Amino acid sequence: MTETTTRCGFVALLGAPNAGKSTLLNALVGQKISIVTQKVQTTRTRIRGIAIEGDAQLVYVDTPGIFTPKRRLDRAMVAAAWGGASDADVVCLLIDAKKRVDAEAQHVIDGLKEGGRKAVLILTKVDLVRRESLLSLADELNQTGLFSDIFMISAVNGDGIEQLKTHFAQKAPLGPWLYPEDQLSDIPMRLMGAEITREKLFLRVHQELPYAATVETEQWDERKDGSVAIHQVIFVERDSQKPIVIGKGGRTIKEIGEAARRELEEIMSRKVHLFLNVKVRKGWGDERERYREMGLDFSD
């Protein structure tokens, strides 16, 4: 394809926490790129997923959920979300159709209005809502004048996904592709590995361990037999949180490690040796280095 016939566009996925952004990103790309849990604020930085639709290369930007920030990490996550919107060719607002327009969703709507940006409205999880309720919600939001188009989707069963892809491809500006045709994400594998382990950590201990944990890949060793040895550290903020992650007789951390290793092997199509360590790092949420690892801006 020549430069004159190809298209390339950035599509930002915005919304309140747990609106379904990461699930939609994975559906659009056709492979798991962003971690998904029932825990709000799981995504902490902008994650790009890359897909080809006809002659268009689409770069989807999964952003952290937008909410009222209280901590430095919160502020950095929200800034990353709005930054993803400002750089995009198409901005999408995802609203959980079951929750309708709650305070968090209204906060994002107000932010888009202030920025003067038109957006594509995507009502998610529509398989859980009656049609009459969906139509009234769409009409209510259409009255804001903020949205250029409205789509109703269920990323879990695939409803509406193909229509979205076609729409985004049509909106992508003319230009050369920015990534190789077979590249699915620009996230480094070291960070991807840490994110996968963080997902398994949250899924396993989400009730006992709120947001006071992060995962970093300390070492990545390619072995001669084609396998890879990955050494990661789970940082918690307090001494009392360490035994929660480790579990009785090391059972919890073993389960986390096994789940993460299996998924890494599936993604990488090779043998993975995963070694996890837990360390207490008080105030890691205020350390510049942690933000650099997560791709977030460290500022007050």
Image (spheres, helix red, strand yellow):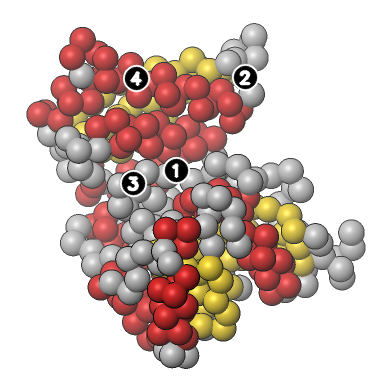
Q: Which mark is residue 38?
A: 3
**In the picture shown, does residue 249 fall above or below 277?**
above
Amino acid type at mark 2: Arg
The residue identified by callout 1 is 35
Along the polypeptide, which appears first: circle 2 or circle 3? 3
**C-alpha distance separating marks 1 and 4:** 17 Å
- Residue 88: quadrant of the picture: bottom right
Q: In this view, does 44 lie to the left or right of 264?
A: left
Identified at 44% across, 43% down, the residue is: 35
The residue identified by callout 4 is 255
Q: Tell me residue 125's x, y (percent).
A: 45, 59
Identified at 76% across, 48% down, the residue is: 181
**C-alpha distance separating marks 4 and 3:** 19 Å
Amino acid type at mark 4: Glu
The residue identified by callout 2 is 270
**C-alpha distance separating marks 3 and 1:** 10 Å
**In the picture shown, does residue 101 fall above or below 240?**
below
Identified at 59% across, 53% down, the residue is: 158
